[in-house]
Amino acid sequence: MDLDAFVAAHRGDWDRLEELCKRRHLTGAEADEILDRYQRVATHLSLVRSTTPDPSLVAYLSMLLARARSRSAGSRVVAWSDVGRFFGQSFPAALYRMRWWWIGVLVADVLLALVMGWWLLEHPSVESSLASPEQIRQLVENDFENYYSEYAASSFALRVWTNNFWLSALCIASGVFGLPVLYMLATNMLNLAVVGSIMVRHDRGALFFGLIAPHGLLELTCLFVAAGVGLRLFWSWVEPGARTRAQALGQEGRAALGTALGLVVLLLLCGVIEAFVTPSPLPTWVRVGIGVLAEAAFFTYVFTAGRWAHRRGERGDVAEAERGFEAPVAG
């Protein structure tokens, strides 16, 4: 077989298939065409391999067929526009749609922490049963404050980020069972109440809140969001409404996964604040102000971008064409 003549005869098919693979959106006719040309090029590749196996041509046609296979199967490359759409519409819409779940968790847990803290302050004997006087003195005078400057800032930010995201991911993943989420929330609030009551009792309340507030406001809110999403996931199969349980769990599960990805960015911000702002020599009011500003920005984001996207019909779920179903093409 004359390889040059073969290439010249079929170059048009290859170029057209390559052009179709580069397009972001295909019409029904173009989707049919890409399948037709895929079959033609596959025949060309088979012929080249059996007669004159030119390595460069075989590699080119193999790569072209792989791209066409991915394109026809619905695979797509994540572009910056997808990232923008996620953070501009999908993520805030999911937060807004599930707002009463995580706001309910937030209110309930803040009240729980306050009640537990008040009870611990009213019963000082409990403190002595939790730790020895030397351990309490070490916590109040050294350990609590030194915790935020014990490691290099960049390393500490990474440790905090991974730990917080792991906890949030557990809340979402175990949410389908319900009770594990409540247990994790209660445990975290109890730890916060115990440390807070000890610091307040020893006249270190200002230090406690001055170190907790800069990162803790947004960090705890992210935890409450994860818990609310997990509990919503649990409720989706308990009370699916007009949907089947499988449909409800699938829809809420996809939205939960998207929320978890969005929390990655928010928790990274929390880690940066905790590592670089909380232990910094800035005045307390500045550090606390940064935490309040981050929290206010989050709520503004949810109740502006999220509300607008939700009103346009966005639910935080993935697009229908990306759910594993095949879109119809023109005949």
Image (tube, rainbow, N blue to C red):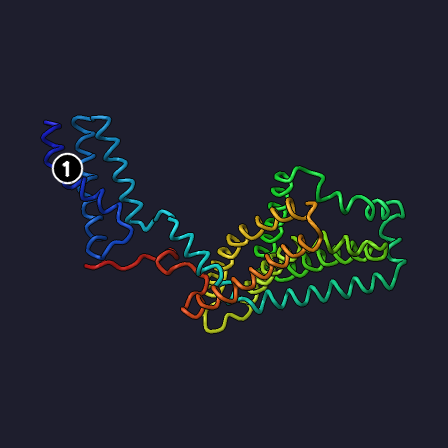
Q: Quadrant of residue 154?
A: top right
Q: Indicate left or right for 205 with 72 as reference.
A: right
Horizontal and vertical percent position of residue 81? 38, 52
**Residue at 25 percent of width and 54 percent of height:** 26
**Residue at 49 percent of width and 61 percent of height:** 92
| Residue extending farthest bottom | 242
Q: Say if 7 sits above or below 302 in the image.
A: above
Callout 1, which amino acid?
Arg
- Mark 1 lies on residue: 11
Horizontal and vertical percent position of residue 30? 21, 53
SS assignment at label 1: helix
**Residue at 46 percent of width and 62 percent of height:** 316
**Residue at 44 percent of width and 59 percent of height:** 88
Q: Indicate left or right for 220 with 70 as reference.
A: right
Q: Nearer the viewer, residue 104 or 176?
A: 104
Q: Nearer the viewer, residue 271 or 128?
A: 271
Q: Indicate left or right for 12 with 224 as reference.
A: left
Q: Which image quarter is the C terminus in?
A: bottom left
